[in-house]
Amino acid sequence: MGIRVIKTALAALAALYTAYSIGLETPLSAGLLAILGVEVTRMKGLRSALVRFVASVLGLFFASVLFVLLGFHIWTISLFILLVFPILSRAQLKEGIVTSSVIVFHVFAREEVTVALISNEIMLLLTGLGWATVINMLYMPKEDNNLALLRQQTEQSFADIFQRMGQTLRDPSLIWNGEELLQANGAIEQGLRRAEVSQENRLWGQARTAWNYYPSYFEMRRQQLESIQQMLVQLSFVYESLPQGELVAEQFDILADNVKSEVYEGAVERKLPELKEQFRAMPLPSSRQEFEVRAAILQLMHELARYLNIAKRLKKHREE
């Protein structure tokens, strides 16, 4: 049983008891409104309650005008839908259309527009949506442990990928199914979703660095994974083992260790210019095949530099 189901049951129960205790008409509607108002995060809950309340009050106003002018006919309901639903949608209140309809149908069923009836409907809204908001605010599961685990999974997948890339440079005949890429992508996408949920459960202090860490972290990893995919494209053209490949493979070995560090190490970035100078000092390719492989290795290094630049921009630095 999910936490949202439990929260929904509690909100509905509290709304029903409240509606019955204060003598509201059609008290079951308060429970329905509470069910509609329960959301997965505190921020979404607040937004949802406000949107539903405003949309319902506007819908109640327009419906009352139509019923008074045109009477309580079925076609009046159709006219209400044709006129009011587009207005609510344009006003960014689409989420409140259902709750608005519930309230309007109550008025239609009574076939009267009175102050007492309007007050009753507004109290139903306040009771149902109010309890949904209270329950939303009371408890939301923390995502810290899940985010930390997803970070570990992502870093381990990256380390495995770099190890595989180094092995492939040393032995191009190595067969690799690339499952680590899928694992990394899954962990990153899930991390981005959970980081968003975690942020939306915090109603203040959104600008604090600690609370923005995981959204920035997983966005960095998403960009880096795209860079890794480009590196793998170049790696696919390395079909021969060369000294240049061995030198680059050593850098991937270093990255496999550094990827789990919270700070930007910079060792590989400092080494790349040295490697390029070494490559220039080496004899020219003796065959077309060697030329193609060395060109692919050089492109691989350029993409590796892009990967490192992403980390350099978004990771902490030791001097901080």
Image: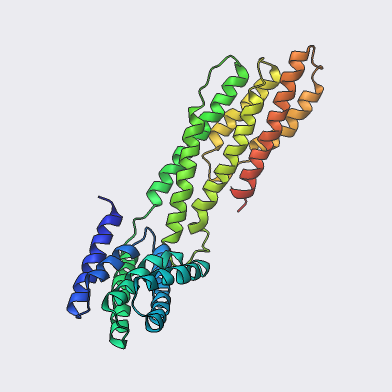
Q: Residue 257 appears at what percent x and percent y?
A: 54, 33
Q: Is residue 51 visible?
A: no
Q: Residue at x 66, y 26 (%)?
A: 234
Q: Nearer the viewer, residue 241 or 177?
A: 177
| Coloring scheme used | rainbow
Quarter-wise, where is residue 15 in the image?
Answer: bottom left
| Residue lying at the far bottom of the rendered structure | 115
Q: Is residue 279 left or right of residue 267?
A: right
Q: Residue 298 appears at what percent x and percent y?
A: 73, 27
Q: Nearer the viewer, residue 60 or 292?
A: 60
117 shown above or below 203: below
Q: Is residue 134 left or right of residue 223?
A: left
Q: Nearer the viewer, residue 192 or 209?
A: 192
Q: Residue 14 appears at what percent x and percent y?
A: 22, 69
190 shown above or below 201: above
Q: Is residue 175 visible?
A: yes
Q: Nearer the viewer, residue 302 or 265?
A: 302
42 shown above or below 20: above
Q: Is residue 89 left or right of residue 293?
A: left
Q: Residue 49 appears at what percent x and percent y?
A: 38, 69
Q: Is residue 159 left or right of residue 311?
A: left
- In the rendered picture of this protein, how many numbered marks are placed on residues? 0
Q: Residue at x 39, y 73 (%)?
A: 76
Quarter-wise, where is residue 295 in the image?
Answer: top right
